[in-house]
Amino acid sequence: MEPFSIDAQKCNQDELCVNVCPTGVIRMPSGADGTPVPTADFSDWCLACGHCVAVCPTEAFRLQWLGSEKCLPVEKSLRLTAQQAEQFLRSRRSIRNFKDKPVERDKLEKLLQMACYAPSAKNSQPWHWTVVEDSAEVRRLAAMVVDWMRAVIDLYPQQAKERGLLRVVAAWDAGEEKICRGAPHVIVVHGDKDYGFGAEDGALALSHLELFAPVLGLGSCWGGYFYSAVNLHPPLFKALGLPADHRAFGAVMVGYPVFRYQRLPQRNKIRVVWR
């Protein structure tokens, strides 16, 4: 069975599918008019990205597993203006003050769904997700991070000081939780420990998640201390129930923010060399 089919009555032979294919496994037949055909190594190199279906203006292109009827159309009326997009991106804030209120499961699922629209190396989509829903469990896991910090302080005091671990542990001992900041939920993205682009693909997915969170009225913040501890502290790794052949690629705290920001602070000037 051919990996894709083309409706010859709809195809206008514009070669868009050929030109957008990332791996060049779609070609036009040589020496004659006709519709695009797969290369001999199509099944070996197709990334299953769906570019070919998404770009076809006449809905002529159909993969075995994907047709235009399964793809939502791009609604031109929903496209952001440059001004809207700029405010959207500049208004993102890392949230560290959360309400004592759980986030609905459907909202958490929507966050994960949007995160999985992030790009990944060769469209591998390597992400696995662990969501800590119980706020009491979040605090229990935060305590395990503090245990790890105490061990780092004992073994590497200078490094611990430079990373601010002494301040965090002192705050914990004083009753202030600076690990997960009182967030009701923590989301961990993880995957095959031997996958070479885990850190990059994980960061991209969490960036999508964090950008979408405010749309749902939520706030988020990268859990740097939590993420650092997961892969280095076996009791925490085990408590999260991560598979033994996985490693964490990142973690974020999620919840309803206490404060609403009113202005857009400036960032440092870009550092760039034009060649």
Image (cartoon, rainbow, N blue to C red):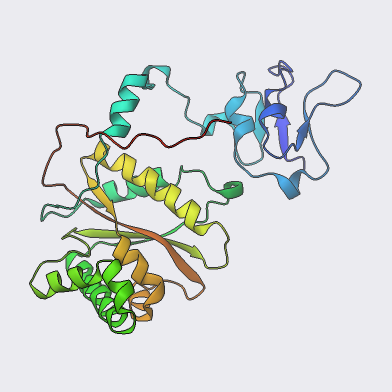
Quadrant where the image shows the N terminus: top right
Q: Is residue 238 above or below residue 196?
A: below
Q: Nearer the viewer, residue 151 or 117?
A: 151
Q: Is residue 74 above or below residue 91?
A: above
The quadrant in which the C terminus is found is: top right
Q: Is residue 134 left or right of residue 126?
A: left
Indicate left or right for 250 with 171 as reference: right
Q: Residue furthest left?
A: 174
Q: Residue sitting at 44 percent across and 62 percent down?
A: 190
Quarter holding residue 59: top right
Residue situated furthest right in the rendering: 31
Count every numbered label the image shows and give the total: 0
Name the quadrant containing residue 7: top right
| Whole-percent x, y for residue 121 in the image | 58, 49
Q: Quadrant of residue 132?
A: bottom left
* Residue at the (15%, 60%) spot, across then down: 182
User: Where does the image place residue 143, in percent across and percent down from the top left?
Assistant: 21, 75
- Residue at image point 33% right, 72% down: 159
Q: Residue 97 appears at what percent x and percent y? A: 14, 52
Left/right placement of residue 68 relative to residue 36 reads left
Residue 104 in percent (x, y) is at 22, 50
Q: In the rendered view, would you say 125 is above or below 11? A: below
